[in-house]
Image (cartoon, rainbow, N blue to C red):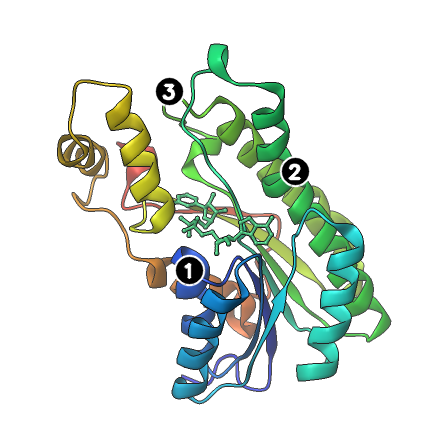
């Protein structure tokens, strides 16, 4: 698969979970990948996997909520691997907590990382795509929680709905520069975030983690949860020339969860 060959893709939160699945899947389609993450040593493991696949990789320790750090990381990624053709805003946080127990800090943390982080990295990368005249593509990882949240996802679901709406405007405003923007809404994917979510829900209910996982699986029409690279398949399509007439769209990759 050479659909992304010669392209430089930045993946935020690419150290583990879905971000790692997207980063390595992009490399399998020929991309060079920059990883922006809070966990550089874990991100180096993703980078090693990308190099084994045959792509170039560079790791940048950055908190996506910090505009100055984002600007520095974008510049460092460009000097390592050249102009950026694709951006996947995947870094995100989730805590399962009822609205009545949600503190102001927890609310802000969800919006800072999930919504503001997506805005800051999109803005800086879009500015550079325009300056370098690159016809790029931005993919934002939202969630089925934007449309059909579980209890305990008040701040999380609202922050992901913000990502979907933001992406629509991004698509309209960047179209004249030949840049597309879309969001992907994953269903439940097997990642450290989901393991933690099951632990948190088990702690606040009578059910075990296994029982809660079985309940979650049951909500997906295809009767299983997804794998990180399955979000990568959709991202590759949107980042490649095959996806160039798709913009402003929000695509569920969810084993049928939103139809369940
Ligand atoms: P994860 O917690 O396993 O991985 C998230 C990655 O993002 C980590 O490497 C972490 O270090 C990084 N990160 C977190 N905050 C950051 C920050 N401020 N700056 C830079 N990097 C940061 O999570 P995951 O399950 O792989 O989820 C990835 C994305 O997919 C998130 O946006 C999440 O909301 C979304 N999502 C996940 C699921 C799921 O079922 N796992 C479902 C729908 C949407």
- Viewer-nearest of labels 2 and 3? 2
Are circles 2 and 3 on residues that touch, CB within 8 Å?
no
Q: Position of residue 154 (x, y in %)?
A: 49, 22
> Which comes sooner in the sequence, label 2 or label 3?
2
Q: CA distance from mark 2 to mark 3?
A: 21 Å
On the image, which quarter does residue 178 sit in? Answer: bottom right
Is the distance from the Cβ of mark 1 to the nearest ligand 1 atom less than 8 Å?
Answer: yes
Give the numbered dot on residue 112.
2
Is the distance from the Cβ of mark 2 to the nearest ligand 1 atom less than 8 Å?
Answer: yes
- Viewer-nearest of labels 1 and 3? 1
Above or below for 214 versus 141: above
Q: CA distance from mark 2 to mark 1?
A: 20 Å
Q: Say which residue appears at 63% left-offset and 36% top-offset.
A: 165
Q: Say which residue appears at 57% left-offset and 34% top-offset.
A: 110
Is the distance from the Cβ of mark 3 to the nearest ligand 1 atom less than 8 Å?
Answer: no
Q: Position of residue 213 (x, y in %)?
A: 19, 36
Q: Which residue is mark 3?
A: 151
Within-10-Å neighbours for mark 2: few <14, some 14–19, many 20+: some
């Amino acid at each position: 698969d050479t659909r992304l060959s010669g392209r430089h893709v930045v993946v935020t939160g690419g150290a583990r979970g879905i971000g790692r699945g997207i980063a390595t899947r992009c490399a399998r389609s020929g991309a060079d990948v920059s990883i922006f993450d809070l966990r550089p040593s874990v991100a180096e493991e993703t980078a090693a996997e990308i190099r084994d696949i045959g792509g170039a990789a560079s790791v940048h320790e950055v908190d996506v909520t910090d505009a100055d750090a984002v600007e520095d990381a974008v510049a460092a990624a460009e000097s390592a691997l050249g102009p950026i053709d694709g951006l996947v805003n995947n870094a995100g946080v989730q805590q399962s907590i009822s609205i009545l127990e949600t503190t102001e800090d927890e609310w802000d943390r969800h919006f800072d990382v999930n919504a503001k982080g997506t805005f800051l990295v999109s803005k800086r990368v879009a500015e550079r795509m325009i300056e370098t005249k690159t016809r790029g593509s931005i993919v934002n990882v939202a969630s089925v929680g934007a449309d059909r949240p579980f209890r305990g996802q008040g701040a999380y679901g609202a922050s992901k709905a913000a990502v979907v709406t933001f992406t629509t405007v991004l698509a309209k405003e960047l179209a004249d520069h030949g840049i597309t923007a879309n969001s992907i809404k994953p269903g439940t994917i097997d990642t450290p975030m989901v393991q933690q979510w099951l632990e948190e829900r088990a702690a606040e209910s009578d059910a075990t983690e296994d029982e809660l996982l079985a309940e979650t699986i049951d909500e997906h029409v295809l009767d299983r949860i997804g794998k990180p690279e399955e979000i990568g398949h959709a991202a590759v399509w949107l980042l490649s020339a095959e996806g160039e007439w798709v913009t402003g769209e929000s695509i569920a990759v969810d084993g049928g969860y939103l139809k369940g």
